[in-house]
Amino acid sequence: MKSVWTTGLIAFAIGMAGSTAATPASRPLYPPFGLDLTAIDTSVKPGDDFFQYANGRYLARTPIPADQSTVTRRSDMTDRIEAHLHTIFNDVSKDPPALPTDIRGKVGAFYAAFMDEAAIAKTGLHAIDPELSAIRAAPDRAALANLMGRSTSDFYPSPFYILIDSDLKQPDRYAVYLSQSGLGLPGIGYYVKPEFAPQRAAYRNYAAKLLALEEWPDPAAAASAVLAFEMRIAQASWTEVQQRDPTTQYNPVTPAQLDALAPGFAWHEYLAGARIGEKQSFVLTQNTAFPKIAALVAGTPVSTLKAWMAFRVADDAAPYLPRAFSDARFEFRDHVLEGQAEQEPRWKRGIAAVAGADCSYAPHSCFGTLQWAVGQLYVERYFPPATKSIISAMAKQLQAAFRRRLERLDWMGPITKAEALRKLDTYVIKVGYPDRWRDYSHVRISRSDLTGDVRAAAAADWAFQVARSAGPVDRGDWLLTPQANNAYNGSLRDIVFPAGILQAPIFDAAADPAINYGAAGAVIGHELTHGFDDEGRAIDAKGALRDWWTQADAAAFKARAAALGAQFAQYEPVPGIHINPDLTMGENLADLGGVLIALDAYHASLKGKPAPVLHDLTGDQRFFLGWAQAWAGKATAEEIRRLTTTDEHSFRKYRVNGVLRNIAAWYVAFGVKPGDALYIAPEKRAHIW
């Protein structure tokens, strides 16, 4: 799961990827009872490679599509969501021009504008004239800083990122967070590690190509200067691991203190451009990086700053521009960085443009979308109401199972345990969709101005965030839209399961309970555990950043977590690239906790009766296979390298093998013994939850 700054504090998303497919209750999607029995590879011993045992035949028969960099069971879910959205979009795009309050017409007009390639080609470079003209005309760094501030609602880039979220120390009110930004490659490692030199060279060529398409002077030289500028930003920035500690990322400042800390950057103009110039306090998340990045901007020639901004405008706007731009973006971002062979069909790209993607991983992927309007249309047509009550009940069972497990912990003392139980009891489960929908009545969408539509949607979203920032925190808020194939644990102490993730193989109302507990139940347990992992444990029962652990309990937790981390450090998903246990610690802890909690809840659901044996599989065997098959999938070497370098989630094979080998019941269920490749002696297993 990946931690991101979101409403309230930190949210953790299940990671790696859409409402439920309306599967009849009498027929599981994977017959006869919810498992894909044809996927099991009996030539592999469960104790040698359980991921391969559970999924081997599926992996062998399922190629990675040419227009993707991965193929997974989760991507099958996303495909079903996209098919549903395609049906909706085709219907609403036939509607008359959008009325002021008509979300169907607005969604339809936006999608129609994206699909009209002839109109896009005719508009050409004029689509980003507002940004390019303003960049060219800017007389100095102060004027450029003002444009950078407008990155909240226009295509401009910025070396800093602004987020309005609940205050970590006063969680009933909002704070304005300022974070480092400005990098166009996937992570800092891509700038500083020698093995990524080919990707850096490709990035420079990509920048030169877009600058040439924009008719920028001397695009090759400008691209080299742009790459050098971003490399200096990367060297000044906090690493992904450093950004995982919430206790170091709460650094409140006034505007005067910000000016003194990071002089050389026109903060007044920047904040005015973002329309938050009247704010009197901000929270810096990577405070020691700010003076370094500000100094870089101050010491970089204005011509280089302008070239960087022009390139990044084209990069961000490329999906909405003529094919020369979108093809160049695909060639670099999807083909070079992820190994994707072919571009997705335009209708899929249109769905992403209007509906957004998973904002928990890349907030900009939801920039300029009508994501909440799409969510409203989606659940009206495709989310079975019964699913909401079933998942809500299951979540309460998981919460009770976690409580029992916390109560039994022998390494946690009574003071910490009382606080932990108090926090667990505050969690609210949100399922399917929010209680209130976003108002889009004031957003003007046109069938003939695609980039204008993106700007209008982005401006409306940012205006919504700014307008509510002075009031109390909205505890009914959602980070993910209903159509998202994901889940998260938020800083509002809410566990959120959008409609999109509530479909097979994660959840199927017609499946055997063991399968649902092994998949959906373990995801629920995963999200609950995030509130107590190495990041989430820094937050108390009120949602405030506070150390509520005794020193002895904190030391015991860290030692047990380190044992799990030492195991994951040995895994090498692609040659030469090992899993970083410090980067993935929270997700690994949550996976382990989630499976243990879900297994307890499954056993409790049997009410003392033995689990039925189905197709010669016991209940526990089906439970563990449910977890393993939920993570079935493979990816190109380039994508695995990217994920292992930048993602807080371990690659999917290790989310199965790396977790289950620490669970005693798995050994019993599949007869795993010394000599098997995954066997770990009981005293060397990670015992945390």
Image (cartoon, rainbow, N blue to C red):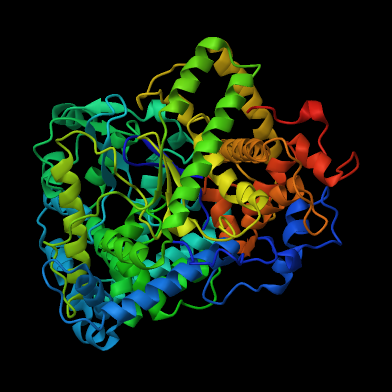
Rendered view: 237 above or below 307? above
Q: Position of residue 688 (x, y in %)?
A: 64, 27
Along the line of sight, the residue nearer the viewer: 372 or 143: 372
The quadrant holding residue 544 is top left
Picture quadrant where residue 4 is located: top left
The answer to whether residue 369 of the structure is visible from this angle is: no
Asked if residue 537 can be seen in this view, the reply is yes
Does residue 93 lie above or below 58 as drawn? Answer: below
Q: Looking at the picture, how far across and down is residue 164, in whole percent?
A: 24, 41
Please state which of residues 547 and 340 is positioned toward the viewer in this rendering.
547
Q: Is residue 483 left or right of residue 636?
A: left
Q: How many marks?
A: 0
- What x and y, as percent, mark residue 170? 27, 25
Name the residue furthest right: 675
Quadrant in the rendering for residue 169 = top left
**Residue 301, percent across and down?**
23, 52
Which one is nearer the viewer's eye here, 1 or 499? Answer: 499
**Residue at (23%, 34%) from the top-left corner?**
175
Answer with left or right where residue 287 lies relative to residue 185. Answer: left
